[in-house]
Image (cartoon, rainbow, N blue to C red):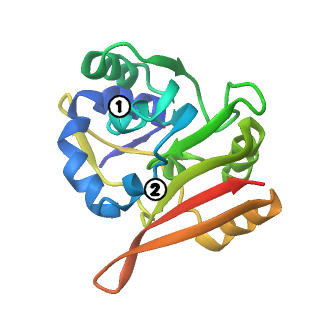
Amino acid sequence: MSNIVDPKEGYNLYADNYQNDYRKLESFDKGEFLKLIPERAEVVVDLGIGDGRIAEHLRKISDKFIGIDISSKMLENCLKYHGNIDLVNADLDFSIPLKSESVDFISAYFLFVHLKDAKGFIEEAYRVLKENGIFLFNLIHQKKPPVLKAKKKKFKIKSYYHIPSHIEEYLDYFWFKWERIDIFEDKFWVSKIYKAVKV
């Protein structure tokens, strides 16, 4: 039997194995997420940066780049793999520790599955974005967390399945203008990518 652990504990345990999952994780979006990153944005924030899997894509478009994650071990690895990056250790399920209207572009790649309060998170994204700022995120079709192995332990990281129609209601509620790309595999959606603009 596998224990279910919270994201902080789980990703601290799994941090050194995470790179082994890059190819599997990227198969969900088939490269479409990265295509929606803007060519330029002054202040860019990667929420749930992990070990910096897409950090180089985001850093090169920005004047100021910030990464935020709940796992201190993942952030250590991010520095090891990518050098000097402005990083913040925080639990994003409660708030985004940034000033209001201070960000031009937010990325949240594979983060929603670990958020309990999706509506509160979307409200926070709206708060910290500047007018016409972009919020790019994805939802994956994962109703049960996978079993992971690290340091001779088997465990699952607690996750939440968010119904896409509910997420879209929240985006509408906070007056985002949004579009969606659906990624299918064998006639079933595996990922939905949202590009939401603060208006």
Residue placed under numbered mark 1 in the picture: 52
Query: Closest to the observer: 90 or 194?
Result: 194
Residue placed under numbered mark 2 in the picture: 36
Coordinates of residue 39 in the picture (x, y in percent): 46, 45
- Quadrant where the C terminus sits is bottom right
Amino acid, disc 1:
Gly
Q: Is residue 90 left or right of residue 193?
A: right
Coordinates of residue 21 in the picture (x, y in percent): 22, 46
Amino acid, disc 2:
Leu
Q: Is residue 49 above or below residue 140?
A: above
Residue 100 visible? The answer is yes
Q: What residue is drawn where x is 44% and y is 50%?
A: 110
Query: Closest to the observer: 148 or 80?
Result: 80
Coordinates of residue 98 in the picture (x, y in percent): 69, 25
Marks 1 and 2, how far apart at CA: 18 Å
Q: Which of marks 2 and 1 precedes in the sequence?
A: 2
Query: Closest to the observer: 39 or 87?
Result: 39
Q: What residue is drawn where x is 80% and y is 56%?
A: 174
